[in-house]
Image: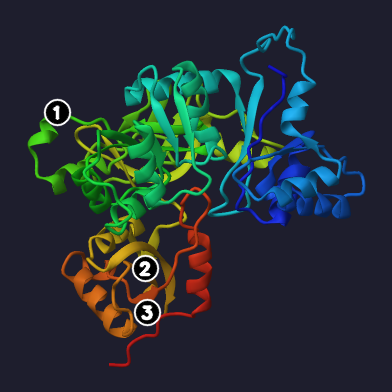
Amino acid sequence: MAGAVVNTINIRLNPAAIAFLLDHSAAAVLMVDQEFFSLAEEALKICSEKNRSFKPPILIVIGDENCDPKALKYALDKGVIEYEKFLETGDPEFAWKPPEDEWQSIALGYTSGTTASPKGVVLHHRGAYIMSLSGALIWGMNEGAIYLWTLPMFHCNGWCYTWTLAALCGTNICLRQVSAKAVYEAIAKYKVTHFCAAPVVLNSIVNAPPEEAILPLPHIVHVNTAGAAPPPSVLAAMSQRGFRVTHTYGLSETYGPSTVCVWKPEWESLPPETQARLNSRQGFRYIGLEGLDVVDPKTMQPVPANGTTIGEIVMRGNVVMKGYLKNPKANQETFANGWFHSGDLAVKHPDGYIEIKDRSKDIIISGAENISSVEVENTLYSHPAIMEASVVARPDEKWGESPCAFVTLKPGVDSSNEQRLAEDIIKFCREKMPAYWVPKSVFFGPLPKTATGKIQKHLLRTKAKEMGPVKMSKL
């Protein structure tokens, strides 16, 4: 309505990263929750110190009676405008006009930076409109849906559900802190019907202690998951607890979801483990996306639907971004041959469903053989002691690279003898996968994540590299 471009900023970034985004985007107005005012203040200070010509944005603080009032008072004492006071200066008779062109920008969002520096993704009005309605159609959302915000709104504008809920006259339930306990309580108290979440959040829900879970659920709750390939074991556990999970896949550059794993009625008679395995695939293109395929990136020819030939997922159409802000080189690379290149490697099954095997950067090449880190991770997730797992390449004196597993154990698991645990995990893997897929090293501890729950593999790759190569056996 105001003609501005919204840029929702990740609250878990440090001041230096936020300063980069504010400067790169030339932010004109900065609205900040009182809880994060000091973070914004520090970021603006960095901007001014690094760029003498930096023009500070208009600063507006949003108060919350549920928070410590000291932060709000501190901001107001600095002369910052309070949000409610700011609204009072508006004109109730303002006659807003729609954009003159659907191609005009509506939002700017920065990629999560799991593999490299964040890039500014510019989205247009037409794409946001189409994705907002596509999300409702795909998910079967009806008027009056009660939606729980477990998905951050700074992640692809909440996959455009911010606008979907306005179209459906839905109810927004917001959480200041996402936890399994808070999710269960919101379902019971507010009769939540839908929520979106990355697999890491689903993992916390299925592993919640009995005293934090409210089961059985009072009604069916629809869950949309994306952000990483969900392990079949987690999907099975969610289904057992009464959640109806829809699996989607997409990127910041495609407004959020681009595919949906359409549930087939004939799957109902299959064992739960088989259902979960089928539902863990990425599926078919979204209704609002004109083109999506898995192709050989060199020839741009579609791969055969045999479930084994790996290609790159490419997209094009109205729900693909305009481009990266101030980054012509990246735009030229990512839109090569008239398609948006996702960087995700996948296969196409005989039934037409696509399934991601890895990011192109995450494929492990061991002795000239390609290893899918996702497939190794799925096996690790089925180990009874493992809550989270991530697999990356570690230098190997003999094979060049070999799988290295980083795992987080479930609460209550005895971790006093990590060597014995690692040996047990390796033995477990040997029984379930080819020998060269088996991790040669296993490390324990919390996994680094972005605010949207994506595991930051680039940090784990760096850590694995710093450990040095796996030594060649002298036997």
Q: Nearer the viewer, mark 3 or mark 2?
A: 2
Task: Residue at 7%, 36% (x, y): give it.
Answer: 269
Q: Nearer the viewer, mark 1 or mark 3?
A: 1
Q: Position of residue 145 (x, y in %)?
A: 38, 24
Residue ID for mark 1: 265
Which picture quadrant has residue 315?
top left
The residue sitting at the bottom extreme is 475
Label 1 – label 2 distance at C-alpha = 35 Å
As shown in the figure, which amino acid type bears the numbered disc 2? Val
Residue ID for mark 3: 398
Q: Earlier in the sequence, mark 1 or mark 2?
A: 1
Task: Residue at 51%, 34% (x, y): give it.
Answer: 158
Q: The C terminus lies in which quarter of the figure? A: bottom left
Q: Position of residue 202 (x, y in %)?
A: 34, 49
Which picture quadrant has residue 364?
bottom left
Label 1 – label 3 distance at C-alpha = 48 Å
Residue ID for mark 2: 407
